[in-house]
Image: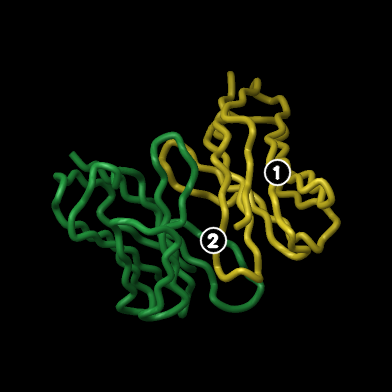
Chain colours: A yellow, B green
Amino acid sequence: AQTVTQSQPEMSVQEAETVTLSCTYDTSESDYYLFWYKQPPSRQMILVIRQEAYKQQNATENRFSVNFQKAAKSFSLKISDSQLGDAAMYFCAYRSPNTGNQFYFGTGTSLTVIP
Amino acid sequence: SQTIHQWPATLVQPVGSPLSLECTVEGTSNPNLYWYRQAAGRGLQLLFYSVGIGQISSEVPQNLSASRPQDRQFILSSKKLLLSDSGFYLCAWRRGQGDTDTQYFGPGTRLTVL
């Protein structure tokens, strides 16, 4: 099974600053999908951004962008102009179109935004 | 638009009691459905997924079972709860066709087994 690793259990950032959350994954496949989900204190899982592995261009959603390094199997999330509402657990996830419907999640990074 | 519901939102049950958590999706047909468990301070563990009525795949051997009696209904059950079943249970859905591959999550159920 694919594994997803988030090596930073906790991160903090000053409000209005930029922070990068790391994610690496292990796979032998060439085509797959990667996601970042946000889980605020309400526990609702919210999709932040997604990336198709066949696309070389990094995905961007407003203040959120990714640095997708396919050869290195790295998928980091950059949050620019951090806001208090960005404080949450962030989960990186992997999905393969070839191994059924499983999504594989990392163990999460808890982000604190300091006012 | 599509919405996903879970109930109850919170549940406290004694060890050995039965469990039934329900998840329903509105606004779509033939979705893929998933049950995850999130233990305190940990990531998501996939428990079951379903690609259609009556079709259930299990990821890990456990004390729980799942059923899909209707296209947009997914039920997580147990005959006898264990202390280790405590956690936050999330239901998710994904479109079953096309390349729209994102999972969307319900609000979750917090289960405490005493």
User: Which quadrant is home to the C terminus of chain B?
Assistant: top left
Report helix, strand or loop for mark 2. loop
User: For the point 61% across and 67% down, which residue is it?
Assistant: B101
Residues packed near mark 2 inside 10 Å, few (<14), some (14 to 19) or many (20 plus): many
Q: Residue B103 carries which label?
A: 2
Residues packed near mark 1 inside 10 Å, few (<14), some (14 to 19) or many (20 plus): many
Nearer to us in this view, B19 or B5: B19
Q: Name the residue under label 1.
A: A24
Task: Give the vertical position of B70 relative to B5 (above or below).
Answer: below
Q: Which mark is residue B11?
A: none
Residue B56 percent location from the top left of the image: 40, 73
User: For the point 30% across and 66% down, which residue is it?
Assistant: B75
Amino acid type, callout 1: Thr
Amino acid type, callout 2: Gln
Nearer to us in this view, A31 or A40: A31
Task: Give the vertical position of B74 relative to B111 (above or below).
Answer: below
User: For the point 40% across and 53% down, which residue is it?
Assistant: B90
